[in-house]
Amino acid sequence: QLDQGCAFHTAARGGLSSVSTQDVPAERPRAVFHTSESDPAKHAEQHEGRLYNIPLEEVKAVFPHGLPYRFQQQIQTFNEARVMVRRPALELLAYLKGSNFAHPAVRYVIYGERGTGKTMTLCHVVHYCSRQGWLVLHIPDAHLWVKNCKELLQSSYNKDRLDQPLQASVWLKNFKTSNERFLREIKTQKKYMWGKQESTEEGRPLGEVVEQGLARVRSASDAVGVVLREIKQQSHRGSFRLLVAVDGVNALWGQTTLRKEDKSPVSPEELTLVHNLRKMVRNDWSGGAIVTTLSQTGSLFKPSSAYTPHELLGKEGFDALDPFVPIPVANYSPREFESCYGYYLERKWLQHEKAHTEDGKAELQFLSGSNPRQLDRLAGPL
Amino acid sequence: AVGRVLRLCRRWGEGPRAQTLRLICATTAVQKKNVGASGPEKYTEAFIKKQIEEFNLGKRHLANMMGEDPETFTQEDIDRAIAYLFPSGLFDKQARPMMKHPTEVFPEQRKIQWGEDGRPFHFLFYTGKQSYYSLMHETYEKFLNVQKHQDQLIAQDLPLQKEKRNLAGSRWLTKIELEEMLLEKLSDDDYSRFVQLLQKLVALPCADIEENYIQKFSREVPVQLQKVVIEPLQYDEQGVPFSTGEGKRKTARATAVVYDNGTGKITVNGTDVLHYFPVVQDREQLLFPFQFLGRIGKHDMVCTVSGGGRSAQAGAIRLASAKALRSFVTEKEVEFMRQAGLLTVDPRVKERKKPGQEGPRRKFTWKKR
């Protein structure tokens, strides 16, 4: 039934998901490694280890700012976005499907060694939620908010806090692209004053707040705060489900590299964005879920061998996040490795003659230690 | 040699001069001695005997000092005692204080070759190289003997002995060894002539008669003696075969234990190899022995390593794992590994800095003025 000469992936192949992966024949690589199921809701155990396709328009809509940089480059090179279905993601999806939204939001923390696929798992979950029609609050990397900030303004709302106009405006822009629909539907419940003249009346769509934040960069951080508060208050009503996806959540409780004008260090609570985000991550609201990732790569002042929640979050963060569901992500299993290797081969990414042989595969597996990032970096020059 | 009694050579026609020399001997300050002309220092027999007595006495004193039994005090004990009493940081072992038997300290020398009347003892003295020519003479005599014996056997129609002497495991004396044996200098030409004569002698079928004589001039080549023994596989509690190996590179020392029936997992000093060696180059070094033998995913390895830097540790583990893998593999493959350089210790170490230079090779900046 499978036409081997066909090189287009977008053709839906119905009977594919039932093919067992026990046989790995070299003449049918695509059959084994790909799956036509592009709706994450239907991903199940039999799809584990396979790659599914996300149409490029959806990528632009759902992930304006979420994907890892190397993955974005890969999308550009291969002209398609293929994400591997892995067990931690399937686990998370199962929990989400079975969760009761009347209860307070459950927190999930994805953790693991460097380069094992935590961010990709998060993106998989975000894709699922956006397909299901949830409102997705995706913060691509919380570490960006606590370091390398050029401008720090004193907040007009609260004298002690500091604003970050640039980061806030960038985030608002991306938030707008991903959640157009909701911004029209959700209405403000209070009147907000932006400075002396501008104000947003009650009952206006949230899109106006976002526009206000984008237009007046000085008040962008406050706009972010308003958006977050509104969404939180309205989520338990049930008109929409809310997913808070934070990558690098350990940034919220660590240290910052920012300094005030008098060279004194800034602690995270003094940043408006961080303060508001912390309120979001508390589980005092219902009607959604909070999925977070720990990341050592961007973290400040943490040793490179730290990967457990306790080490990366510190005492403060751990207590704040305390009842959470940990989801460990490990290196590739042999099956996942085979499918990733087969995908690279098929897309002619591995050009070296020896890479096509069994020995080459064993060598790649040894050298990368089945670590996804190492494999990606190794396969680059080949 | 100042103050020592020199037994002067009384040459022909040097009567008056000999007396002058004896005069000089009494007052050494009068004439400056031409050290080069008199040749190497000559030690008299009496002198050597006295040295031996002093050595033995000193040995007993030393044994008493160290609290050991003088009767059973061996040369190794002497060496240890001297190293303890006179510790020296000099690098050259020959320069350190030592106490050895006089026969080892004073080189063997030719005794005087002529008698009281000046007439030399040996009939070949006037050839200049008496020992060499007498040796050639003897060897040729044996050669003629063997030929005569051969002729006799042919005359009696007896079969000639055809047992070939095994020349593969033996070599002739080197020129230096021959010089030591004869106590006189040889030229290369002389040496080659002697070796040719020996070979001609050995080539004769009946050379077995003179076997004793020939053996004085041949040495065994210890080729097979230094062959490395490959250890057999050991088995641990679960019955999994494993083997150990040790390796070093620069200052790093590593031991590796390679288990069979594995999945290719490697643990270094308790941590995973990906964490211990984040650089790909080091992991490639570890991969090399397994890849060469085609056994990448088949063995597990647990190693400990210390010292050196990142590259040195990787090289040390590579050597250790290659040595451990010898037990799992056929002899032919061991030979292939040896030729690939997997089993050789890398001799490169950090070169010493020399005085007058900034580093081992780099000179100071040259300034014209």
Image (spheres, helix red, strand yellow):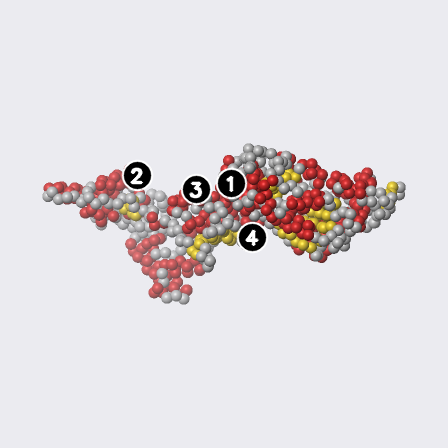
Q: Secondary structure at mark 1?
A: loop
Q: Chain of mark 3?
A: B
Q: Which residue is mark 1?
A: A25
In the rendered structure, the answer to whether residue A24 lies left or right of residue B233 reads right
- Residue B48 visible? The answer is yes
Q: At x 56% / y 40%, what residue is drawn?
A: A31
Q: 10 Å neighbourhood of mark 2: few (<14), some, or many (≥20)?
A: few
In the rendered structure, the answer to whether residue A136 lies left or right of residue B198 reads right
In the rendered structure, the answer to whether residue B333 lies left or right of residue B16 reads right
Q: At x 23% / y 46%, what residue is drawn?
A: B214
Give the spatial CA distance, label 3 vs label 1.
35 Å
Q: Are marks 3 and 2 on the same chain?
A: yes
Q: Which residue is mark 4?
A: B271
The x and y percentages for residue A82 are 62, 40
Give the spatial CA distance, label 3 vs label 4.
29 Å
Screen quadrant of the N terminus of chain A: top right
Please, what is the three-letter code of the amino acid marked with disc 2?
Asp
